Amino acid sequence: MRRVTPFLAGLLFGLGLCLSGMTNAAKVLGFLDVAGLWDPSLAFVMVGAIAVAFVGFRAARARGRTLAGGPLELPASSAIDVRLIGGSLLFGVGWGLVGLCPGPAIADIGFLDRRAALFVVAMAAGMAFFSVLPAIRPTASATAALEDG
């Protein structure tokens, strides 16, 4: 059951993305083009997703464990900081330029979409770079020592 539940959740998520039009970059870009030929249909998808997520998170908190039986890992912080704002801006700019975000891009790979595959490779490279960034970025004490020396 530990492997079946995440698979079924991912399958349901992917089907929802396909049926809603979120895997169609042109439709997403039409939704984001509020100054041009705006397509408001994805607003209903977002409202529906928020409602489902709201109920799902409430049920998960009450249960205290994932459906697969693992520990429930929710963010400990609710602070709005520079990293959150910067990441949100980067996500939004990428979404607006390409019309894809991570979930739909991964679903599009199943349709052998080369553009989505390139997007996912670039996204994975960015994630890998970010994970090693603290190791290559000088610490505050090292920077101070360089400035003093």
Image (tube, helix red, strand yellow):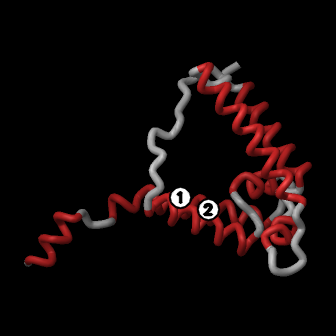
Point out residue 82 in the picture as x, y percentages from the top left corner: 44, 63
Q: Which residue is mark 2?
A: 123
Q: Left or right: 116 with respect to 129?
A: right
User: Residue 116 placed where, x, y %?
Assistant: 76, 63
Residue at 57% across / 21% down in the picture? 64
Element carrying mark 2: helix
The percent position of residue 46, horizontal first and vertical second, equals 79, 52
Q: Residue at x 73, y 26 (%)?
A: 5
| Residue lying at 22% horizontally and 65% vertically, measured from the top left | 140
SS class, disc 1 = helix
Q: How many marks?
A: 2
Between 61 and 13, the one lying in front of the other is 61
Residue at the limit of the structure toward the left, as seen here? 149
Task: Classify the position of the C terminus by image quarter.
Answer: bottom left
**Residue 57 — which label?**
none
Q: Which residue occupies the extreme bottom position in the image?
A: 36
Q: The residue under label 1 is which amino acid type?
A: Met
Residue type at mark 2 is Met
| Residue that mark 1 sits on | 127
Tell me, yes or no, whether the two marked residues, 1 and 2, touch with CB atoms within 8 Å: yes
The residue under the point 87% across, 72% down is 38
